[in-house]
Image: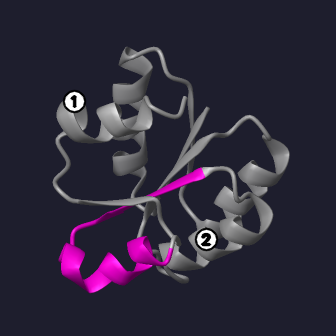
Amino acid sequence: MILIADDEHYVTEMIRRKFKEKNLECMTANTIDDAKKILDENTEIKVVIIDFHFPESDGTELAKWMQEHYSDAIRIAVTAHSYEKYRSLEKDDVFHHIFQKPIDFETELFEYVKQYV
């Protein structure tokens, strides 16, 4: 199971549909609080795709919370900003991988995620 956390509803739905086409089940969250609630209620989530920017906070908060509560789940970040700005978060194991938008779904995101689900 995959969780997609992004404050943009159209982004979560687009990624969810792409994964569904590949027969992968996804859930979506448009706030960090909703993502935490979904994680607390669904122990089968293996991968969480997290946008960096949310109106109330940022995806790093969710990833750090997951390190404490769900350390086995794979944390993948997506950002429209420069990867260089966030590289240290990958090196510090806050995120397992960081993708820069726009993401090539077929050759990047799907290939990375399918290793874990």
Does the magenta segment cover residue 79?
A: yes
Q: Secondary structure at mark 1?
A: helix
Q: Residue at x 53, y 72 (%)?
A: 94
Dividing the picture into quarters, in which one does residue 43 lie? top right
Q: Is residue 102 left or right of residue 14?
A: left
Considering depth in this image, is 97 or 52 the residue closer to the camera?
97
* Residue 41 counted in the magenta span: no
Q: Which residue is mark 1?
A: 106
Say which amino acid is labelled 2: Leu
User: Which quarter of the figure is the C terminus placed in?
Assistant: top right
In the figure, 104 relative to 100: above or below? above
Percent across and percent down for residue 34 are: 68, 59
Q: Is residue 49 visible?
A: yes
Whether residue 53 is visible here, answered yes or no, is no
What amino acid is at disc 1? Answer: Glu
Residue shown at the point (69%, 51%) measured from the top left: 72
Using the image, determine if residue 35 lies above or below residue 58. above
Percent coordinates x, y for residue 113 in the rendering: 42, 37
Q: Crowdedness of circle 1 by 10 Å Cα count: few (<14), some, many (20+)?
A: few
Residue at figure coordinates x 35%, y 47% from the top left: 10
In front of the other: 31 or 89: 89
Q: Position of residue 41 (x, y in %)?
A: 83, 45
Q: Compare marks 2 and 1 and give the one earlier in the sequence.
A: 2
The disc at residue 62 is 2
Stretch in magenta? 74-92
Q: Label 2: how many residues lie within 10 Å, few (<14), some (14-19) or many (20+)?
A: many
Numbered marks: total:
2
| Label 2 element class | helix
Please name the residue shown 74% across and 51% down the image: 39
At which x and y percent is residue 37?
77, 57
